[in-house]
Image (spheres, rainbow, N blue to C red):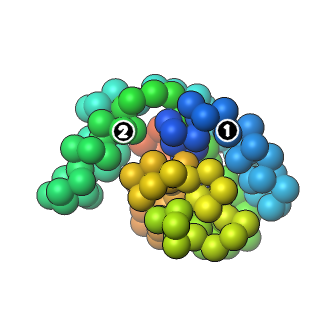
Amino acid sequence: MERTFAIIKPDAFAAGDAGKILARIYAEGFKVVGLKKLYMSKVEAEGFYYVHKERPFFGELTDFMSSGPCVVMVLEADGAIKKWRDLMGATNPAQAEAGTLRKEFGKSIGENATHGSDAPETAAFEIPYFFSGLELL
């Protein structure tokens, strides 16, 4: 079993879509081993997205991620990283395939409803950023 990190972003949370997204996660066979609702501070968002610090969208991204509540999760499944990324769909909702979360709930490249680890190394950083080992059940 593999674990991955996932976020239901502030846009999807504000739109009332968190429950629908969580239902899809369970329907697709993921086990949710960690789940929190939180409101990231700007500093927390900057730390989480530090890999994008030099990119032109960094300020906009961290402003958005600290703009309202979100749901952070640790998901478990066989091939969880790829499976979650496939369920999320393309970063740009306009290019995402039908049936993906970003196609259904995303509004734009910046407000695309969900986040997910893109590799085991990324998950290894992202999971403990928000969860201690004792919180993963």
> Residue 108: where, in percent of width, then height?
45, 55
Q: In this view, does 12 lie to the left or right of 49?
A: right
Q: Tell how many labels.
A: 2
The one nearer the camera, 42 or 135, is 42
- Indicate whether 90 appears above or below 55: below
Alpha carbon distance from label 1 to label 2: 17 Å
Location of residue 121 by image quarter: bottom left
Q: Mark 2 or mark 1, which is nearer the start of the sequence?
A: 1
* Secondary structure category for the residue under label 1: helix
- Considering the image in quadrants, where does the N terminus appear? bottom right
x, y (%) of residue 24?
A: 78, 53
- Residue on which the image places disc 2: 64
Residue found at x 52% / y 58%: 116
Judge the density around disc 2: few (<14), some (14-19), many (≥20) Cα neighbours within 10 Å: some
| Nearer to me, 133 or 61 | 61
> Mark 2: which secondary structure?
helix
Left or right of 73 in this view: 131 = left
For the point 82% across and 60% down, the residue is 29
Q: In this view of the protein, can residue 134 be seen by the observer?
A: no
- Determine which quarter of the picture holds residue 37: top right
State whether residue 76 is above or below residue 71. Answer: below
Is residue 68 or residue 117 the one in the foreground?
68
Give the residue type at disc 1.
Answer: Ala
Pick whichever, 22 or 101, lies toward us.
Answer: 101
Farthest left residue in view: 54
> Residue, x 53% and y 63% (percent of image)?
93
- Kindly identify the residue that appears in the image at 76 percent across and 57 percent down: 30
Q: In which quarter of the image is residue 8?
A: top right
Residue 94 position, x and y percent, is 52, 67
* Residue for badge 1: 18
